[in-house]
Amino acid sequence: MDTKELLKARFNLVRRDLNRVLDRLTDELLQWAPREGMRTVGGQLFEIAGKEIELLNWMKQKGEGEWVEVEEYGGRENSVDGWKSVFQEARKETLSYMDSLSESELQSPVKFPTDWWEGLLQPELPMHECFRTIAYHEWYHTGQLVSYLWSRGDDPYDW
């Protein structure tokens, strides 16, 4: 498998897990958090989608531009179906950009501030590692959402 095939396999696996969570959510749960001070379910979804969009833009700028955070999704963040469309659009854009790159471009460096875990605390990473980071980040927060649901009695081993 080449780098793109490996990345696509990782993206597919991670998205499969997120979709399993999304299928168990209701619109009413979006404002729920296990306890005060924790992100809501919707907040976790915002974090997942926002980081993919933000990192993709960062990669397109080769780490030379401004970090721009996502602020809203045009109201789609108010429903599970809206979130599904946000995730589909973000992933489509990510895969399209990845497909536009050559193998050597996937090896090219992208600068990162050294205090970002997204950059593995390194001053720069190869482009392919930035794509991998999108998947890792999504999986991390998907795992949190699995725990949220489990705390409500929805046992993931029964899914």
Image: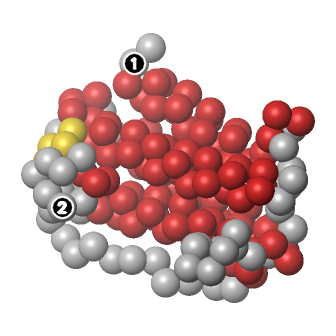
Colour scheme of the picture:
secondary structure
Residue at 59% from the left image edge and 73% from the top image edge: 39
Asked if residue 34 is positioned above or below residue 106 in the image, the reply reads below
Quarter of image, res 84: bottom right
Q: Give the residue at mark 1.
A: 2
The answer to whether one can see residue 34 in this image is: yes
Q: Residue at x 26, y 42 (%)?
A: 127
Residue located beneath label 2 in the image = 115
Of circles 1 and 2, the one toward us is: 2
Q: Residues within 10 Å of mark 1 (few under 14, many from 20)?
A: few
Q: Nearer the viewer, residue 91 or 27?
A: 27
Q: Quadrant of residue 104?
A: top left
Residue positioned 80% across, 41% down in the render: 156
Front residue of 43/101: it is: 43
Q: Is residue 132 left or right of residue 32?
A: left
Q: Mark 1 belongs to which amino acid?
A: Asp
- Is there any visible trace of residue 95 in the rendered image? no
Q: Position of residue 116 (x, y in %)?
A: 24, 60
Report the amino acid beneath label 2: Asp
